[in-house]
Amino acid sequence: MKNVNEVRAPESDRLSGLIERVSFHSQESGFTVLKVKVSGRREPITVVGSAAVIGAGETIEAVGYWRVDSTHGRQFQARQLLSVAPTTAEGIERYLASGMVRGIGPHFAKVLVSNFGGDVFAVIENEPQRLASLRGIGPKRTARIVASWAEQRAVREIMVFLHSHGVGTSRATRIYRTYGDYAIAMVSENPYRLARDIRGIGFRTADQLARQLGIAPDSMMRAQAGVTYVLSRFAEAGNCATPVGLALSEAAKVLEISTEILQVAIEKEILEGQIVPDDIAGERCLYLAPLYFAEVGVANSVIRLETPNRPPWGAIDTERAIQWVETKGAISLSRSQRDAVTLALTSKMIVITGGPGVGKTTLINSLIAILERKRIKILLCAPTGRAAKRLSESTGRAAKTIHRTLEFDPATFDFKHNKDNPLDCDLLVLDEASMVDVVLMNRLLGALAGRAALFIVGDVDQLPSVGPGDVLGDLIGSGRVPTVRLTEIFRQAAESMIVRNSHRINSGEMPQEGGEGGRKDFYLVNCVDPEEIGRRLVRLVAERIPKRFGFDPITEVQVLTPMNRGTLGARALNVLLQESLNANPTERVERFGLSYCVGDKVLQLANDYPKEVFNGDIGVIVDIDISEGQLGVVFDANRVVYDFSELDELALAYATSIHKSQGSEYRAVVIPIATQHYTMLERKLLYTAVTRARELVVLIGDPKAIAIAVKNRRAPSRVTGLAQRLVANAGSQDGNDI
């Protein structure tokens, strides 16, 4: 007698047919939903299964069973799914029209099939010159088609290789472009190189592949890769170095291998130059080599630039200069501003810090006006495009990003300006310095000639840089660089509740709702339930703020949230806002688990020097070309083209993390705050978010969570050695070119 609880496996069945449409395909998991035309059936069949790569027009052979889905009805569940290149004219045309081969869309798919029939693939591979004879194709399109065909074949092999070893395939194209035809051999030899070389592939993915390939869990290759991974994780949290004991304990936890093996791995990494040991505050620490040399380089550059401490403009009668600039600009400098002018004009390097409304812009404009009379060459720069644009608008002078100031050279994949080819200037003014990490600061200071002066401007009370280090805080904390801290709020700025609340938050006081002149610019919307906060936030951005204030909900309103994950994280909010603000796009493409549509606001996630777009830049998708496999984004009037395989560099930007907003300014900012953000709630975070707004702040959330953020002033301190190096006159190593 059979057990009544026994579950019988479904009977196996076979199905074959032509793929009419790929309804869904996850390049990470391989999960796919297909519409398949089967001989003898009028309507296409829904087939669900798993495949490394799949395309419309291909023929499939599937083994599985029939089932009835409660939502989607009858479908074929494939246990095995094998696809083969199409052989019929209809299949070939559908395959080529799907965008699988760049340079061929629906129109040219029809042209090729009508001319070459079933021999199209053989012509592309063996006689590509025949393509150029067809009207509208020509040599350039032929070259794109041939290159794309070869790349697709290689990428397909990589995807199948990765998929067969249990690894997602979404970044196979990037792997191919990095390693070329030797990709599978190189990855098989050392899969951990993927985590080092390929953006978007982390240690855990590489480790999964290594295990599938038979690499022992306690192998030295894995131990060395794991130690570097742990140090990288601490660097991602902003630290330049990690205490040895902490690195060992964390690596042992992650890798589940003995500390004895890990200690040997650390010694090997030190011998190979990947890790550098050094003491910070008497504790032995480990640096990733690039961060060590960057930190040493910044310290050495500061000492080099301030010695001797004679500014290039010579002696200036500061009292007369102040009187002249006040008369010329019809302004009256405060006592603290006058003292700052005097200190700056007699120093070769100075830090100017302070919150909103305290006169930093007036001070910088006054200094520039005075020094321009001395006929010295002045360069202005800031970390991001938006910050540079704002600096240019506030000074009336040209300003560039740091990257554009240093001039990236695609031929050498490096900056043109360095210690051997320094910047041609007598004074460099760096704005929004709080967001400059140690690596970029090293490159900038290393490119300054010894004669040049440096004015560093920033708000030290904002969050430190997204990248490693706390350069502005360390420069001030070391006492090595003359520093001015402006604190007096000017009357006109004090009329803004945004400014007043910024200073209230920075002083540990709760923000207040209100505004001057009959128009409120700061709103507190009390709401406790996270899901309700999300719903009300969408209505605020999409309807209420545009209707009340006339702001464009996409280009002028920015949602800033403490975290990326969770109900109120940037990822979840972006999905809600995209559905509301861009519900009917003209074009759409799915990649890396996201939907990218024409009209979407997007955020650049990594520095891309050849494209001249950088981490934190925000743009709008303006076109999608399926046949070319490309997407166009406009950043500050510059159109940048991305291949679909590069879309992991872009994220939706209707909502961004507060960290990513540094250096930017928006007409209106909406900030969700809930107790689910508890681990991130601290004063600098909330202060930074509020100071991003120019005309309107809406703080929506739990008053208890706001109070937690305001009262918590102890942001996690970063492990850096820069201040110590400056106090100790640094070392003799020269890290400017590392």
Image: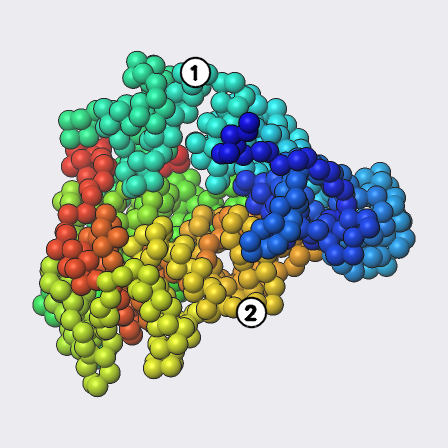
| Figure check: 655 above or below 130 | below
- Quarter residue 528 falls in: bottom left
Tell me the distance, in whole angstroms, between the alpha carbons under discs 2 and 1. 52 Å
Render colour scheme: rainbow
Instruction: Tell me the number on the disc at residue 219.
Output: 1
Q: Label 2 neighbourhood size at 10 Å, few (<14), some (14-19), many (20+)?
A: few
- Quarter residue 167 falls in: top right
Residue furthest toward the bottom?
A: 518
Label 2 or label 1, whichever lies nearer to me, is 2
Pick whichever, 409 or 86, lies toward us: 86
Pick whichever, 210 or 634, lies toward us: 210
Whole-percent x, y for residue 131 in the image: 85, 49
In this rendering, position of residue 239 left or right of residue 409: left
The residue sitting at 16% across, 33% down in the picture is: 728
In this rendering, position of residue 583 left or right of residue 449: right
Q: What's the amino acid at mark 2?
A: Asn
Residue receiving disc 2: 584
Q: Determine contact: label 2, label 1, CB under 8 Å.
A: no
Whole-percent x, y for residue 488 in the image: 12, 67
| Figure check: 306 above or below 283 | below
- Is residue 168 shown to the viewer in this render? yes
The residue sitting at 18% across, 77% down in the picture is: 514
Q: What's the amino acid at mark 1?
A: Ser
The residue sitting at 29% across, 55% down in the picture is: 562
User: Of label 2 and label 1, which has the lower sequence position?
Assistant: 1
Whole-percent x, y for residue 712 in the image: 14, 52
Image label count: 2
The residue sitting at 27% across, 38% down in the picture is: 239
Whole-percent x, y for residue 490 in the image: 15, 73
In this rendering, position of residue 232 left or right of residue 4: left
Q: Label 1 neighbourhood size at 10 Å, few (<14), some (14-19), many (20+)?
A: few
